[in-house]
Image: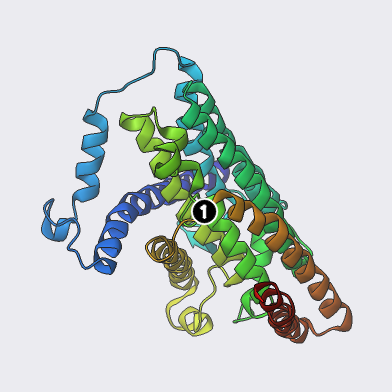
């Protein structure tokens, strides 16, 4: 009984640490995004709240708490409140199945650095991500505002479209591992055998879909200010608006952690055996946790980099890319992967598949696009 209670306390402490890290990263992602935007636009960025503006996220939080909490008179009050709460809840729940590290032993208690290790971890991620769109839909509909409703409908159709391509991209990963467990997927990539080397096309598809799932530029049409003011959260203020904005940055970090788990070895890093031999298993595991967080932060930087580099798509271009572009590419990737596994050469098949795809696109450009222009 004491062992079970100690294990429960250890797991609870780990979940609390991950929760705090996630919220901290989400808060300071706003600061670094403003700094990156300022650098790209030859500006200074936030520099008043603390040294180098490092306390700006705290100032923003105080501002959100102090602003007037406005609820439209003709809105559905309870659903209006439930929308941002659901978005925040689903954003935080996705991290439960991400393996942040291997097994550690602390105080005689041995446990994994993972919230819950279920054998359907990937389905958990997709299930929670699919529920996230309800927070946007409920908030947009309950606002009783046509701009909010249009933004919510855009978000729903966009997420459904890109989840199909994302799911097909992950099927190729499952062909390698034979398991839906995120832990098993990471264990299959140890010692540098990362899936990115076998699935470069699948990773690109997944990355593009992650931009759409997180409503990030160039796929931020649900909150397109040029057409829909603020989109689905037009009527929100104070911390209800803060929940929506915070959930977006949490989703960015968790999306980065999921991509690192699926394609970049998770908590695996070069020299892990050396660190284990020299400093022990616990140190090596915590270094691996830092490596996973570092990989996720690198993807967060990519999200920000693309936002301040590429223009926003039109909505018909967005849907066309999802249905006519990414879904056929995902199917092609699954077929190539299955063929590579069948002949026992998945790496060769993955590279050959990318080369054939590039050649096919070049031939298509030469035969059809230039002909249409002529």
Residue under the image location 30 percent in, 54 percent down: 28
- Residue 94 vs 293, above or below: the answer is above
Instruction: Give neighbour class at mark 1: few <14, some 14-19, many 20+ (Cα, 10 Å).
Output: many
Residue under the image location 84 percent in, 83 percent down: 344
Residue placed under numbered mark 1 in the picture: 219
The quarter of the picture where the C terminus appears is bottom right
Secondary structure of the residue carrying tag 1 is: loop
Q: Which residue is situated farthest in the front direction here?
A: 374
Q: Residue 62, located in which quarter of the rendered image?
A: top left
- Residue 211 vs 72, above or below: the answer is below
**Measured from the top left, where is residue 197 in percent x and y?**
64, 80
Q: Would you say 308 lies left or right of 321 here?
A: left
Q: Nearer the viewer, residue 118 or 332?
A: 332
Q: Nearer the viewer, residue 350 or 123?
A: 350
Q: Which residue is situated farthest in the right direction here?
A: 342
**Measured from the top left, where is residue 75 in percent x and y?**
46, 16
**Residue 189 visible somewhere in the drawing:** no
Q: Residue 244, located in which quarter of the rendered image?
A: top left
Way the structure is coloured: rainbow
The quarter of the picture where the N terminus appears is top right
Residue under the image location 51 percent in, 37 percent down: 151
**Measured from the top left, where is residue 309 in percent x and y?**
40, 66
Q: Would you say 327 lies left or right of 33 here?
A: right
Q: Nearer the viewer, residue 233 or 80?
A: 233
Residue under the image location 61 percent in, 51 percent down: 316
Q: Residue 364, located in which quarter of the rendered image?
A: bottom right
**Residue 218 visible somewhere in the drawing:** yes
């Amino acid at each position: 009984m004491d062992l079970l209670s100690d294990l429960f306390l250890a797991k609870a402490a780990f979940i609390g640490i991950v929760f705090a890290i996630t919220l901290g990263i989400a808060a300071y992602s706003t600061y670094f995004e403003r700094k990156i935007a300022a650098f790209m636009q030859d500006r200074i960025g936030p520099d008043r709240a603390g040294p180098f503006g490092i306390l700006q996220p705290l100032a923003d939080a105080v501002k959100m708490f102090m602003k007037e909490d406005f609820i439209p008179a003709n809105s559905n009050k309870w659903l209006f409140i439930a929308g941002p709460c659901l978005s925040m809840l689903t954003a935080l729940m996705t991290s439960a199945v991400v393996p942040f590290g291997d097994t550690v032993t602390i105080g005689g208690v041995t446990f994994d650095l993972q919230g819950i290790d279920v054998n359907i971890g990937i389905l958990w991620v997709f299930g929670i991500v699919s529920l996230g769109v309800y927070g946007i839909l409920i908030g947009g509909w309950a606002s009783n505002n046509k701009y909010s409703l249009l933004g919510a409908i855009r978000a729903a159709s966009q997420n459904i479209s890109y989840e199909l391509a994302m799911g097909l991209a992950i099927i190729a990963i499952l062909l390698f591992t034979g398991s839906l467990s995120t832990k098993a997927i990471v264990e299959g990539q140890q010692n540098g055998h990362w899936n990115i080397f076998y699935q470069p096309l699948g990773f690109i598809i997944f990355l593009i879909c992650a931009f759409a799932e997180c409503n990030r530029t160039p796929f931020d049409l649900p909150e397109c200010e040029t057409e829909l003011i603020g989109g689905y959260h037009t009527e929100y203020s104070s911390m209800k608006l803060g929940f929506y904005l915070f959930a977006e940055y949490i989703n960015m970090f968790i999306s980065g952690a999921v991509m690192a788990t699926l394609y970049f070895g998770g908590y695996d890093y070069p020299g892990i055996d050396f660190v284990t031999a020299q400093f022990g298993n616990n140190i090596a595991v915590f270094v691996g946790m830092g490596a996973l967080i570092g990989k996720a932060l690198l993807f967060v930087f990519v999200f920000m980099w693309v936002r301040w580099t590429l223009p926003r798509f039109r909505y018909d271009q967005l849907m066309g890319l999802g249905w006519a572009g990414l879904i056929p590419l995902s199917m092609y990737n699954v077929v190539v992967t299955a063929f590579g596994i069948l002949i026992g050469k998945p790496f060769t098949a993955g590279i050959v598949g990318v080369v054939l795809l590039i050649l096919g696109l070049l031939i298509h450009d030469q035969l059809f696009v230039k002909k249409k222009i002529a």
